[in-house]
Image (cartoon, grey):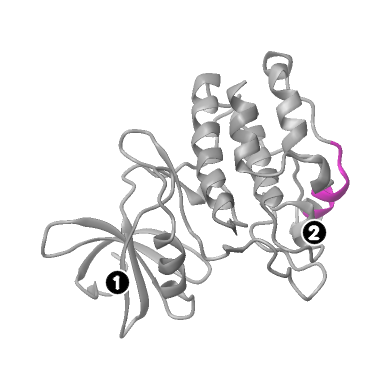
Amino acid sequence: MTAMFPACAGPWQLQAVLGRGRRSTVYRGTDARGRIAAIKLSRDADLAREHRVLAGFDHDNLLRPLDCGRGAQGQWLATEWAQGGPLGAAPDGGFDEPQVRRWLAEVAGALAHLHGSGWVHRDLKPANLLLRADGTLVLADFGEAVPAGSPGPAVPGTIVGSPSHAAPEQSQGAPAAPAADVYSLGVLLHEWLTGRPPFGGETPAEVLAQHLFAPIPRLPAARAQWQPLLDALLAKDPARRLPDGQAVLTRNAT
C-alpha cells in the first residue's frame, strides 16, 4: 500500500518521500513554475532558522535554499533537489582515490566557507552529503549548525550529531568548534578509503568509547599514503587536529 503524505506545503505539490529523519521528512515537490525541489516538513524543528542559516552562505558545495513557510502540517523548507540523493555507504574496499580526493576537496571547501563565516555544522555524515546529477557533493541539513563558540550540551554524555561520526569532544560538553567538523570529515575519509568506519560498536556507548580511547586505525598498505592526513583529521585532542576546513583544503592540495 502506498504511504499517504500531505498533498502540498505552501506552493509546493509533494510527490514522493526522499527520506525520513528523527524530526522531519523530506519530499520531492514541484511548484506552478515547474521547479523541482526537496521539501523538508517538520512539526517541531525550527526550519525557518535553518533557512536563515543556509541563506547566509554562498558556496557551490553548500545546499541552496529556496523558501520556507508554515502550514497545517507544520514548518516546511524548500531547497534545491540534489538528484543523486544521499551519498550513502562506501563499497567494500572504498572508492577510487581520484574520487576520494575530489570529494574531500569539495567537502573541505564547503567547511572552509562555513568555518570562515563563523559557523560549525556538527552533523557531518554520509546522509547529509547529497549528490547532484553531475556528481558534485553538497553539504545539507543545518539543523545542528551553530555559531563557533556556542556552548555544548549541559548534560554530560549527550552527543551532538551522530555517534558514528561525532568528534570525541562533542560528548564532553565542549563549545562548538570547527575542529569537530574536521574530525567528522576524518571519519568519512576512512570510510571512503576502506569501505568501513574507523570505530565501531554494538551500541552508541560502545561507539563513543571507541572515539574517545581507541587508537586511529592503520590503513591498508595500498592506501597508506593517506595515513598522515587521516592522523591529522582524527586526532583525539582538538589542539593536535587540523583546525578547520581551510587547513584540510590546503593540506589536500599538497
Picture quadrant where residue 155 is located: bottom right
173 left or right, relative to 132: right
Pinpoint residue 228: horizontal percent, then vertical percent: 76, 25
The one nearer the camera, 120 or 18, is 120
Q: Is the magenta stretch mostly helix, strand or loop?
A: helix
Instruction: Name the residue nearer the viewer: 5 or 66.
Output: 66
- Name the kind of residue labelled 1 in the image: Met
Near mark 2 (Cα within 10 A), the count class, few <14, some 14-19 or many ≥20, is few
SS at mark 2 in the image: helix
Residue at numbered disc 1: 4
- Label 2 belongs to which residue? 205
* Residue extending farthest bottom: 72
Compute the Cα span from label 1 to label 2.
Answer: 36 Å
Indicate whether 157 appears above or below 252.
below
From the viewer's perspective, is 22 left or right of 169? Answer: left
x then y, percent, for residue 30:
19, 61
